[in-house]
Image (tube, rainbow, N blue to C red):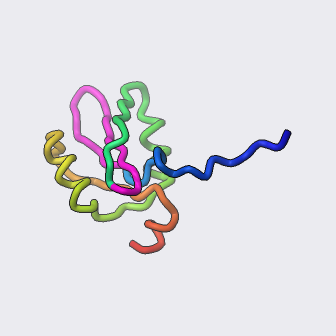
Amino acid sequence: MIPQKNINHHHTARYLVLLDQDDARRALLFAQDDRFLGEVIDDDNGLVLDNLMRAGNLCPPPRRVAEYARAANAASLLCFALDEEEAEAA
């Protein structure tokens, strides 16, 4: 059997927004349509978020993403585009 690549991007993260926290590094993940997908808490060595940031490109957050992040008390809005198409457009 040949493995099939998942072409359904409904639950694929497109944006990563970093949140400043003293106790742990946190980030919010958003889909292509700016829906909130989940939160990443990286309290060990920061490797997970470091790898995600390296895979993406710094970008201005879309309006709906910025509004959601501000509601989550984000001190600063560092947004990374995780999708190659968005990174090329930025």
Percent position (x, y) of residue 45?
Answer: 43, 30
Q: Quadrant of residue 36?
A: top left
Instruction: Please indicate whether residue 7 sits to the left or right of residue 58 in the image.
Output: right
Q: Nearer the viewer, residue 59 or 22?
A: 59
Residue closest to the eye, 36 or 21: 36
Q: Residue at x 77, y 42 (%)?
A: 3
- For the C terminus, which image quadrant? bottom left
Residue range corresponding to the magenta coloring: 16-33
Let me know if residue 87 is in the magenta part: no
Relative image position of residue 20 (x, y in whole percent): 23, 40
- Whole-percent x and y of residue 69? 21, 47
Quadrant in the picture for residue 81:
bottom left
Q: Residue furthest right?
A: 1
Residue, x 41% and y 34% (percent of image)?
46
In this rendering, the count of numbered labels is 0
State the quadrant of the N terminus: top right
Residue plotted at (30% across, 29% down): 24
Decide: is 63 above or below 49.
Answer: below
Please provide percent x and percent y for residue 73: 14, 40
* Residue 28 part of the magenta-drawn span: yes
54 shown above or below 27:
below
Answer left or right for 39 relative to 64. right
| Residue 36, placed above or below residue 61 | above
- Look at the picture and state if 7 lies above or below 88: above
